[in-house]
Image: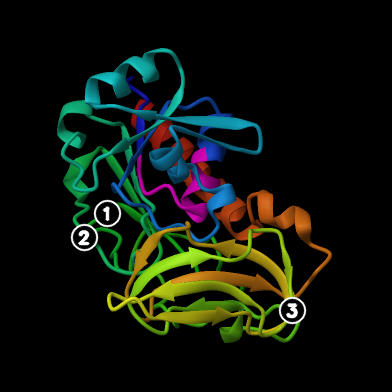
Amino acid sequence: MRDLILVRGGGDIATGTIWTLRRAGFPVLILESANPSAIRRSVSFCEAVYTGEAEVEGMKCVLAKDEDDARRLLEKDELAVLVDPEGKSIGDLKPAVLVDAILAKKNLGTGKDMAPFVLALGPGFTAGTDCHAVVETMRGHDLARLLTAGSALPNTGTPGLIAGHASDRVIHASCAGVLYNRAEIGDIVKKDRVIAVIRREDGTEEEVKASFTGLLRGLIRNNFPVAKGFKIADIDPRETEYRNCFTISDKARAIGGTVLMAVMEYRKNAHE
């Protein structure tokens, strides 16, 4: 437990970090909300909150019932997720490293005093102020760069360009309501195909249509309540990239590698 790493968030980018740390032999506990909203559910350990367990690239994550159960699972060298969005267990568990991988584009309560070494992914944090280091999450030349001073680039709201598509790759809810899926992750969807419907409080429904023909890489869970503007789906124009729907992305893997490097550097310096 002296090398315990707590990771706040278990979405697809966080999962790349968690998977990498576990492969390197570190005990990891994920802290999540009671209702995770991952779009790329097939590669997100946070799905265990709903299903009891989730597997990504051969690595299994199980849901801990409470803090005591989380300790028991860690002692058995299992990867676990605990519903603890406020991080109440951090003080009791006393992790060596805390990684904020919520990617909310703002700090939701992580502080530099929560662990001997605190890392944060993406914008909303300042290295040296509310964490010890920040990892850049913006695609481009500086993706996965470790910052020991300053902040990551601000969120642009526009996803990376793939085969001529950028902002239209991500679909947002046009109204508030409950989402009901009409397609599955991995489907080839034609332009304007209805991939989901949003049922409003008054019982009327709004169709969610594919913005172009491509591979449905991400889709929020069925029966999930959404607000207007909420991100609900992700389409990849490369129809041949089916495998990508079920494997950790290059971006998540790069960020995970930097987190591992930073943790190893911290341990080396702490032991000198």
Position in image of residue 75 (x %, y %) = 38, 13
- Mark number for residue 131? 1
Would residue 68 appear left or right of 218 to someone viewing this image?
left
Residue furthest right as drawn = 240
Amino acid carrying mark 3 in the image: Lys
Position in image of residue 82 (x %, y %) = 31, 35
- Say what secondary structure mark 3 lies in: loop
User: Are the residues tagged 3 and 1 within 8 Å (C-beta)?
Assistant: no
Disc 2 vs disc 3: which is toward the camera? 3
Amino acid carrying mark 2 in the image: Thr
Amino acid carrying mark 1 in the image: Cys
**Nearer the observer, 108 or 207:** 207
Q: Which residues are magenta?
A: 7-18
- Say what secondary structure mark 2 lies in: loop
Look at mark 3 in the image and give the residue it sits on.
190
User: Are the residues tagged 2 and 1 within 8 Å (C-beta)?
Assistant: yes
Q: Quadrant of residue 1?
A: top left
Q: Quadrant of residue 128?
A: bottom left
Q: Which residue shows up at 58% across the image and 48% down it?
A: 43
Residue 28 belongs to magenta span: no
**Nearer the observer, 253 or 206:** 206
Position in image of residue 238 (x %, y %) = 78, 71
Q: Which residue shows up at 74% across the image and 79% down it?
A: 190
Please determine whether, in this image, residue 85 is positioned above or below residue 230: above
Look at mark 2 in the image and give the residue it sits on.
129
Q: Callout 3: few (<14), some (14-19), or many (20+) C-alpha neighbours within 10 Å?
A: some
Residue 8 belongs to magenta span: yes
- Say what secondary structure mark 1 lies in: loop
Please state, as top left, top right, bottom left or bottom right, where the C terminus lies in the image: top left
